[in-house]
Amino acid sequence: MPNKKYCVELTEEQRSRLLERLGRGERPAAEQTRVRILLKVDEGPEGPAWTDARTAEALEVASGTVAGIRRRFCERGLTGCVERKSPDREYDHGLDGKQEAELIRLACSEAPDGRSRWSLRLLADGVAQLGVVEDLSHETVRQTLRTDRFQTGSSLIGAVNG
């Protein structure tokens, strides 16, 4: 058997935490699969020490997935391997507070002539015409007006999206 670069050896405490996590069945399927992979490739005294190929076949994943789980376990530890990693990138929000207020003011105003209500694209164009921003995407308007951002937004977004 070739030497593996990344060896998984779980302690009793880590093994019990993984089994507990798996037993509850409340976690996402991908996370449960990562837990199962770690339990199968465990080369510690209690572990079955399955090969990557055997584990991949049993859990219906690619052998590269198993190798990646091994690598992440060695690099990030148990929690960093099992739980999903947050993205490193930061997103720039499309509008600042004053611009958002202008968008909401426009959305709450009377719809343009010939329209019964505002559409996202009409709002984006309207905010740009007012000179609040140079250019605005209808998707930025949607995200700005989505209901979970405002307690009273459900009526506002309903009126906009129709």
Image: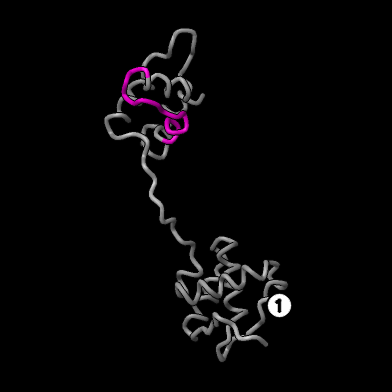
Name above or below for residue 126 compared with residue 152.
above
Task: Provide residue 10's location: percent of width, then percent of height.
Answer: 51, 83
Name above or below for residue 18 compared with residue 156.
below
Q: Which residues are magenta?
A: 129-143
Among the 4 quarters of the image, the one containing residue 146? top left
* Residue 23 visible here: no
Name the outermost residue toward the bottom: 45
Q: Secondary structure at mark 1?
A: helix
> Residue, x 39% and y 45% (percent of image)?
91
* Residue 98 visible here: yes
Q: Is residue 125 found left or right of 69 in the rendered image? A: left
> Residue, x 56% and y 91% (percent of image)?
45
> Residue, x 72% and y 72% (percent of image)?
57
Name the outermost residue toward the top: 113
Residue at the disc numbered 1: 54
Tell me the kind of residue under disc 1: Arg
Name above or below for residue 159 compared with residue 11.
above
Task: Provide residue 23's location: percent of width, then percent of height.
Answer: 57, 72
Task: Provide residue 53's location: percent of width, then percent of height.
Answer: 70, 76
